[in-house]
Structures are given as C-alpha cells and as structure tokens.
Image (cartoon, rainbow, N blue to C red):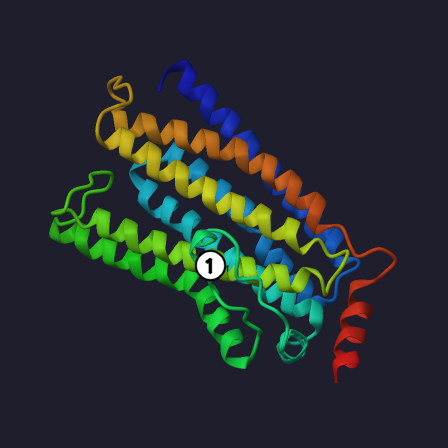
Amino acid sequence: MGRLGTFLVVISGVITIIIGLIFIEGTVRLYRSWPLKSYCIAVATIAVFPIASLCFLLSILMPRAHDVNTTTATLYQPLSLVLFYKLVISYFGREEALKQTLDGQLMPLKGPPFYALCICLPTTYMNTKLYYLMKACIYQLFMAPCFLYFAMGVASKTGVYVAGQFSFENAAIYILVLGGLSFCIGIYSLEIYYKMTQTLLPGFYIRSKYYILQMYFVITRFHVLIFDALGTNGYLPCRPPISSFVYGLYLRNSLLLFESLLLALLARYIFLRLAPNRRLDNYCESMADSIT
C-alpha cells in the first residue's frame, strides 16, 4: 500500500473511532430525557453512522470483503429511514394515535422526486387506506433492496451480473432501475409523512432529522455507483498491486468516512435537541391522552 495507503488507513481508523465515541456520548445523553421506547428507536436510527463507518473502514482494510461490508452499510441506511418513521410514531405514543390525528388532513402530494408528475393530481386527504399504502411504500424502502441484493448474488453466481457494467445482457442495469424505482417511491412517501407530522410536532425537528438520514443514504449510494463503475471499467489509476477497482474502493470509502463524520456531528446536534420546555416522555403521554 505504501506510505500514502498506510496514512489513509490510520486516518480512516481515527475517524471511525471518533464517530463511535460521538454515538456513545449521544446515546448516554439521550437516555437521560427520552422515554425508553423512543430512546431505543432513536439509538437504532443514529447507529447507522458508526455501523456504516465501520463497514467503510473494513472495506479499506479488506478489499476482498468489500461486497459484504458495502451491502451491510447500504442496507442499514434505508433501515434507518424506516426507523425514523417508527420514531415519529413513538412521539405520538402509539400508531393508532398518529392515524387518528392524520385522518382527514390534506396530503402534500407535490414533492420530490415526483414533483413534476404530481402537479396535476387532485386534492387528496389522508384516510386509513392511504395511510397503510404510505406505510407499505416506506417499508419497501428496506425490503426491496434486500430482495435485490439476493437477486444480485444469484445473478453473480450464474454470470449474468457484473457490477459497474451496463448493457442489456447484464442484469446490473435492471437491478439498478428497480433499485432506483424503490428509492423514489420510498423517499416520496417519507416526504409526505414528514410534512404531515412536522406541523403536529413543533420543536421536534422532524424535517432536520429526516433530511440528515436521507442525505446519508443518497450520498452513499451515489459514491458506490460512481466509484464502482469507474474502477470496474479502468478509469482510475492502476498501481500494482493495487488495481483500478481497489483504488476506487480506497477513494470511495475514504470520502464516505469523512462525510460520515460531518453528518454524525450534525445528527448528534439535531437528535439531542428536545422540544422547548418539554420532557419528551410527558409530551408523548399527553399527546396520546388528548387523542383518546
């Protein structure tokens, strides 16, 4: 690896340790003021930063295991968005309270990534069927990638899938399209969800929490797609014994670790903030009682 590679590994290890310490410090502080249910969900949500960072570091240390590490990181990120959905429910005390509160409210259908397609949609109000449809679209944000990664593994064994090479004979392009469609549907549903709930929970920073998790998800997917394609097709330097693909792995994971540190610091600041002059457990109980 040389001196540059050794320096890269050391810096990456230090960044990963710092992210882990930020996570531990944040979980301790959260425990002091959050009810147990919301605390557990919040911790599982922000755990995406140390877990993904550890996977990025292991990909640098063990390039041959990059498939397992990348899959773990890119699966936990949509899971964190599903956990965000559950976290907002915990603010209301229980899901039934949330459904009753949203029932009959105007749905903000105009939003990314389908903004242009939604301009002509009629005015729509939330009801039970639409709520469960929105919930299913959010859950598939995690379930669909699990299925696609399984299909990718089977296709790789049979030789019809080659990462980074896009042709009609290669399954990669079809898996990429299906993954993109799943992403758009899930993100659109979450956009509607956070817009409808943020006005009901002023001071809980619903939008900020959502955008941090969404940004991490999008940035990681973009880096994986771009650097894997460049490395696979030989557009990056090849310095034996480091191939073009491995060179891309080093660059990609190093950038992701640095970005993970920035987003972890921002997430710590946002997730530790409570609604002004409120203890979260008391607020959740009052919210549920007021609806019943």
| Residue closer to the observer: 9 or 189 | 189
Q: Residues within 10 Å of mark 1 (few under 14, many from 20)?
A: some
Residue 16 vertical position relative to residue 276 in the rendered view, above or below = above
| Residue closer to the observer: 59 or 38 | 38
Q: Amino acid at mark 1?
A: Cys
In which quadrant of the rendered image does the N terminus lie?
Answer: top left
Taking 259 as reference, is 230 left or right? left
Residue 94 vertical position relative to residue 62 in the rendered view, above or below = below
Report which quarter residue 221 is drawn in.
top left
Looking at the image, which residue is at 23% across and 54% down?
A: 153
So how many labels did they put on this image?
Answer: 1
Taking 150 as reference, is 288 left or right? right
Seen from this angle, which residue lies furthest right?
Answer: 277
The percent coordinates of residue 251 (x first, y second) are 40, 27
> Which secondary structure, mark 1?
helix
Looking at the image, which residue is at 78% across and 80% down?
A: 289
Looking at the image, which residue is at 53% across and 60% down?
A: 190
Taking 110 as reference, is 21 left or right? right
Circle 1 residue: 118
In which quadrant of the rendered image does the C terminus lie?
Answer: bottom right
Residue 1 vertical position relative to residue 227 in the rendered view, above or below = above
| Residue closer to the observer: 184 or 38 | 184
Looking at the image, which residue is at 25% across and 23% down?
A: 235
